Image: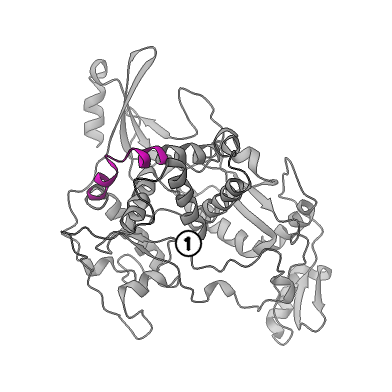
Amino acid sequence: MTCVARELSRHSKNVGNVDVVWIHGCSRPPLLRLSYRKKQSTKIQVYLHFGMKSVDWIPKMRLAPNRSNVKADGAVSQLYNHCLLHDVRHLFEDPYMCDLSEDKNCRAALILIKIWALQRGLWRNHDGWSEASVALLMVYLLRTNAINSRMTPLQLFTVLLQTWANTNWLGEEKPDHRTYRAAAGESYESTFKVRRKRTVLIMPSGKDNPVETAPYSPLSDADPQTLMEAYEFTDSYLLGPVFLDCSMSYNFLGGVSPNFMKLLSWHAQKALQDLRRSMSSFDILFMQRARFWQQWDLYFRVQTVSRKADDWEFEVRALLEKLERGLGNRIHAIRVLSTGNGEFRSEETDSDQFLCLATEQNLAVPCRSTSPTGTTNIVIGVSIDPETSQRVVDRGPPSDRHEELSRFLNLWGEKAQLRRFKGQLSTRLFGMKIILAFKTKTNGAVALSRTLLCIF
């Protein structure tokens, strides 16, 4: 790719500027962007993707979720497999796109989805849904008769929102936010390692293309007995939502993080409520901008230690996972400031969306997936649930575990207290040093800031 980029840059009069672009801020393999301006008002961009022709050299058994090709860590191996298949994604995605080529209503609904997502910072994210994955979901709904070509674009848009909001993508229960789950007490052991079952979508095959199930066999008695169970259970497949092609080899949503999927479902639920409230909700859904700096109740910044250039994305995912576990149902949603959800800096460069590197520079240096702030600081926005945000934290060890109890008391000191009839320690927090709040909409912001200290 380096040789091609430098050769094209020598013919700038014909091809324009040549840049290496890490699409959507993702640290995975980059693209070449050719930008040619014919006139002042006309700008043409062409993206060149370098991938593989086929994956015939990879045994299908190696792509099963319970196979570890890199390390003992299943998540690392599954991400590695997805990156390999992502380079040959045209073999899995292109055969289905013809279903939408002549459907005008579906194409119009896809435009509505783009506008709705752009206004909320849900488009062009490094860990979110792409245009291709949304189009593939529409093909899935067409083939399962959930939608049809006679439906209006607004009806198709509504069905897509319902699919995002009502599908159990991550195998998580959705209790009523008014039920104080943690107030009744939670066990000291993490409840997030409990074996849960997610909903798995499989693209129906065409009449002339029967389902070609990938080979699978359990390695031990603890492994799932079938390939379907391997994708369904959250302790077997660790990446996030699952939407498979008909061969059950490629996950169209392998790059979508659990945090983004939760946020997308949350926004979809809010949009459905607006549609039910009034059919004249066009202005709320498509005209009002609610990107990162307009949609959250509380903002705070975490200073990170400078590490390797490609660690930012993984560091953010681990941090958000810990925050979600610690805060529980005290919040509605949480999101990091990253590519695709901040404000546009310039209409010409559109730096909020793409990270690029001139071909004259050393292309061997990986591009870092940083936030639009241009610093290593992680900026996070939180939507607070005012009804549950002021609960005390109930995370301490039981009183009969003396060694763990001693460590917990040494850490928190006077802030820790033993709850009566619980046999479990909780903490009341009265300080927060890392919080940088720019705006608050609810009284629960102060209590939530105190809670965040317990997580760190």
Q: Residue, x 46% and y 51% (percent of image)?
A: 159
Q: Is residue 429 left or right of residue 377?
A: right
Residues shaded magenta: 95-109
The secondary element bearing badge 1 is classed as: loop
* In the foreground, 300 or 186: 186
Q: Residues within 10 Å of mark 1 (few under 14, many from 20)?
A: some
Q: Is residue 272 magenta?
A: no
Placement of 139 over or under 15, stated as above or below? below
Q: Is residue 106 magenta?
A: yes
Quadrant assignment for the N terminus: top left
Instruction: Let me know if residue 309 appears in the view.
Output: no
Quadrant assignment for the C terminus: bottom right
- Residue annotated with mark 1: 167
Q: Residue, x 84% and y 69% (percent of image)?
A: 414
Give the residue type at disc 1: Thr
Residue 373: x, y in percent? 57, 36
